[in-house]
Image: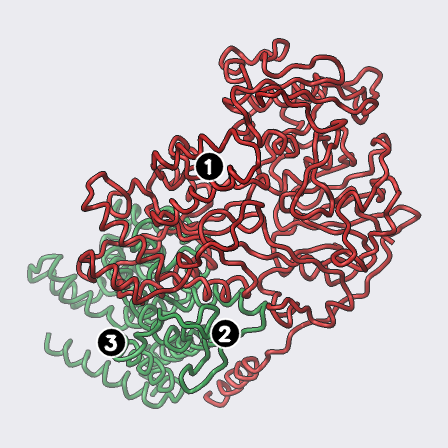
Amino acid sequence: MLSYSSSTNSLWAMAWHQLKKDRAGIAGLVIVMLFLFISTGVWLGLWGNGWSDTSAQFNAHPSTSHWFGTNAIGQDIAARGIYATKVAFEVGLLVTLASLLLGLIAGTLSGFKANSKTDSLILWVMGVLDSIPFYLFVAAVAYALKQHLFAMHLAMIAVFWTSIARVIRSEVIRIKNMEYVEAGEAIGLSHFKIVLNHIIPNTTHLLLVQGTLIFVSAIKTEVILSFLGLGIKEGISWGLMIAESTQDIQAGHFANFITASGLLFLLVMGFNLLSDALQDALDPKSIGKS
Amino acid sequence: MLSKLLWPVLFLGMLAGCQQQDNSLGETTSSIIDGRKIYRHSEDGKPTSLDPIKASTVYSNMMAVNIFDTLYAYKYLQRPYELKPNLAADFPQVSDDGLVYTIQLKPGNSFTDHPAFKDGIGRNVTASDFVYSILRSFDPLNGGTGAWLWQGKIVGIDEWKTNGANYDQPPSGLLAVDDLTIRITLTQPYPQLVYTLAMGFSGITPREVVETLGQEFGSRPIGSGPFVLDSFDADVAYLSKNPGYRQETLDIYAEGYLPERHAGLGLESLHGKTPPFIDQLEVHFIKENASRWNSFTKGNEIQYTTVPKDKQNTVLVSADPITLHPLIEDNYHSSYGMEAGFVYHGFNMLDPVFGQTGDPQHDARSKALRCAIRKAHNWDQKNRAFYFGLGSVFPGIIPPSVPEFNAELSMESVSLDIPGALDLLAEHNWNDQNLPDFEYHVTGSVLQKQFFEQMRGFLNKINYPTNKIKYQPYPSFGNFNKAVKNRQAPFFFMAWTLDYPDAENTLQLFYGPNQTPGSNNFNYQNPEFDQLYEASSVMLPSPERTALYQQMNQMVIDDCVVISGLSRKKINLWHKNVITYPDREIVGGYHLKYVDVK
């Protein structure tokens, strides 16, 4: 155990060392942290509170009182864009954590019981879910559960967990054949303890990378579903702002569209950069090269 | 990497500065091809059926009155709207008690050819065809949507339906006396009867063709109207001039021509000629605003459009008075008129919170709450945000498009009064702690969400907590309407389009016996109102009847049943090579037979 712990620390330390050298990765990290900061501020009620206030200034140009102008019913676009950051993080976090948990459990079970009936059943379920076109499936689930507060979240979780489970399954199959696992079995440790203490901790780097990818996908999907009217019902999201802007653009007002898509672009770009960098940093081969 | 990011960001920034409007217009091309005059009309929705008994939408009605004949029609240019005989030779002879209507048909009108007729040649239209056509709406097998116009009003017609709907034994109240004479006997005076005979629902159909085609009649209709349908699908309907249509010259002065209103449109050139003037009519159903606008401005496609909301700031220089952009003025003819209807917010009066329960204390508090919400509603902002300031806000439920409209009525019920609302809430012990959840039921769409958000903004002004104002969208109008009819919507946003220019058509929305699933979506129950409605419904237009209408209007205002209303204004544009004066409101599609092109 001591040697395992020490090697883990070493892995994370080397990964951090590697990440620091990746300028794009650091830029991504800064962007994500900036958005997290904004989101936390909204959550604490420090800014973005006036997102629903209406006024008589319709489609106003950017000014000191309205940084990005106002929309068709006089709402402050900047406040809405900022508030929507919180919504994006809420959706991203919830969907990511739930998908990771589900994917981790299914993937671990499937991998540890590889070639058993349990494994076949889990693989069959994942195969069925993956065979349905992604957006069609998500839209169908979201539509079917439309009255449910978390319909959109459930729809995304139902889809996203399978990719995590596949990655975890292969990693678990690899790990369970390693000598230290065999040693654990030899000294009489239960399967549950082996999985919990010796296998799952060794998949955390994969979960981290998968988490960043799912996070971005969840935000993008939320925007698409909200645009289609299947997403956020209460509050505001970038998807709803873009949906609103389809009318504004025809009338020559671009602020809603540019604000929402610009913020989305920045956050997705930040996460992609960070995700790429994490993948490189946590890849044992690249660590070995450095 | 960061430098690579810089350019897209700068590009987006440059886009933000792009406020230039696209006013580029295509060159209008001739509409006469190989000597055939072709007019390409457009509508922002499509008809679901061309069968007149299903003409419940403006799109279906417009098609029905051009393919089928009706006994009466509206004068082409006269405003306020005025009826004129169409297939009928004259206005009906009405008995002294107002119960028996005798109508003569013009002789020599025939249906267009179809194999179901003897030798395939269209036969003459007779009084029996009219009787058959009205009865079709009552046949349970047909799924007609217009029976409400005559239900319980024509002697024996309801029994005819329950007794098996035998067309060979028409009810005693609806008879063909001879080939050209119709006699209608009413259960009680029904002054609006003649209006109903100008609606698409009363379009005259030939029995043998209907029975031959069955359900297909809705897509392959045969009538005796000014046009014959050649083909029809979800995108476009092609119609040809009916060569056998009766030869009646157009008298523009009798139709209501006024130089100050109609000069410069070329209508004078139609005087004395025999419609229809065009050889082919195309009706393009284009719901998407951008597509319709692009097709219109292209020059060689559709020749008429209403101006979509998102193009109003392209077309208009000012809203009051309405001034069009010079480029639009130079290239197109235009007209603008108020819709024959209005938009409103309504309360369900059977709702246990917002409605009436019979408990005086509760009813007083709920009325105060409804009235406070109405006082918080800012019609001016709604008008400017969603209707480009073109709408006409009026108090109550009698809109400006009907003759009974009272321009002198107090505007208090449509005036913003935040202090008054706050006082009212305080007086009745309403505060942010005990205010009930406010559910806003509506068909789900981006636009409707904005309506909701604006309403939420209004309510916030009277300290209604944001978390108590809830958006309840429905996937389609059908679902939303079902919820309203099932009394599941305490508050809803709707529009009403008048079927005929008589305020009775809106007052019946508040008549107790019409409660849901009938037309009274508010489930408003007021015995005094019902008594006045019943008294007025048998009266001919008169100052006395108008006075009763005004009393009913005031009751609805006083009880805060509805937040009403606003009549929208539509801007019509058409190419300068087209001679027309379009109006799809009460007039329906009757104007299309008077269209000419050059």
> Is residue B189 left or right of B88 when viewed as pictured?
left
Q: Are marks 2 and 3 on the same chain?
A: yes
Colour setup of the view? by chain
Q: Residues within 10 Å of mark 1 (few under 14, many from 20)?
A: some
Q: Earlier in the sequence, mark 2 or mark 3?
A: 3
Q: For the residue marked with disc 3, what is the amino acid?
A: Gly
Residue marked by disc 1 = B508
Question: Chain A appears in which tint?
Answer: green
x, y percent for residue A163: 35, 60
Q: Is residue B256 above or below residue B385?
A: above
Q: Chain of mark 3?
A: A
Query: Considering depth in this image, is B373 or A105 the residue closer to the camera?
Result: B373
> Is residue B432 left or right of B557 when viewed as pictured?
left
Q: Are marks 2 and 1 on the same chain?
A: no
x, y percent for residue A248: 53, 68
Single out the mark in the foreground, 3 or 1: 1
Q: For the residue marked with disc 1, what is the amino acid?
A: Gln
Residue A45: assigned label: 3
Q: Quadrant of residue B281?
A: top right
Residue marked by disc 2 = A59
SS of the residue at dot 2?
Answer: loop
SS of the residue at dot 3?
Answer: loop
